[in-house]
Amino acid sequence: MVVNYAHRGASGYYPENTMMAFEKAVEMGCTGIETDVHMTRDGVLVLIHDEMVNRTTNGIGFVKDYNYIDLSKLDAGSWFSGEFKGAKIPTVEELLLFAKDKDIIINFEIKSGVIQYENIEQKLIETIYEHNMENRVILSSFNHYSLVKCKKISGEIKTGILYSEGLYKPEQYAKMVGADALHPHFYTLNRDIVKRIKKEGILINTYTVNDVSYMRYFIELGIDGIITNYPDKLNKIISG
Ligand code: G3P
Ligand code: CA
């Protein structure tokens, strides 16, 4: 059965990467949650898409320059709509605690681009183990070296290679990186590519599929996971 990953939670309807967006996604029938991990100055792992807080909160500046106590005071809801005023930037720990008693997978995307967070992989994996969630998560990143580091720290936690452009022989590349999955932008996929990747036993979780006809197409191709802002629409298709 295809995993229905709610992209930043049910972000089509609620402010992305907030507990409300995650809770509503579960209510809508998601079976996975995709979210983005950054780290504060004092080493707290937090869930926010951008490296700066400007777009999605009432604050300014880089996540890395905030201590958690100050970051936790920011309003992460009002930018989306006034009715969500007061929503907070959640921590990795909060989401793990929320997911623990639910039948869902968490896809943590490690944001490691221009800004590199020291030991973010180690900290994230330690936190996952503290909550016994090692079999319920998949770690992804556009920084593929970060995924190599993750595999060195824990061989059992799944990793997924994020990419947005066509990748040369992605199934071979995944093996080289030691990854379990490919997380391609859906534009890069077609029937032949999916077939080739699946033949090599590599999982495919594609993003960000918001159109129902594409959702149907990828299910028909036998994709493993679909990352969407509209988990309710995908759930409707999956449930028939
Ligand atoms: O993980 C899939 C997708 O979230 C990657 O792109 O920019 O939405 O984090 P972005
Ligand atoms: Ca993401």
Image (cartoon, grey):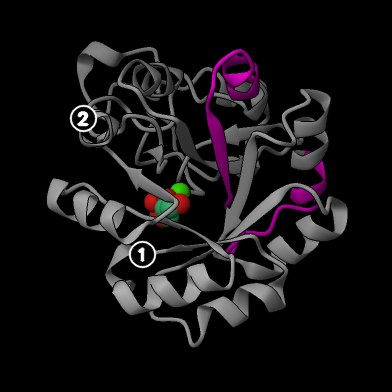
Residue 166 on image: x %, y %:
39, 81
Numbered disc total: 2
User: Would you say the beta carbon of the disc 1 residue lies within 8 angstroms of ligand 1?
Assistant: yes
Magenta-colored span: 94-123
Q: Residues within 10 Å of mark 2 (few under 14, many from 20)?
A: few
| Amino acid type at mark 1 | His
Q: Name, please, the residue furthest toward the bottom.
A: 168
* Chain-order first, disc 1 or disc 2: 1
Which quadrant would the C terminus be assigned to in this image?
A: top left
Q: Secondary structure at mark 1?
A: loop
Tell me the distance, in whole angstroms, between the alpha carbons under discs 1 and 2: 22 Å
Residue 168 on image: x %, y %:
49, 87
User: Would you say the beta carbon of the disc 2 residue lies within 8 angstroms of ligand 1?
Assistant: no
Which quadrant would the N terminus be assigned to in this image?
A: top left
Q: Is residue 66 above or below residue 146?
A: above
Q: Secondary structure at mark 2?
A: helix
Residue shown at the point (52%, 72%) measured from the top left: 199
Of the residues tagged 1 and 2, which is closer to the observer?
Answer: 2
Name the mark on residue 45.
none
Residue position for label 1? 185
Residue position for label 2? 236
Q: Is residue 239 above or below residue 99?
A: below
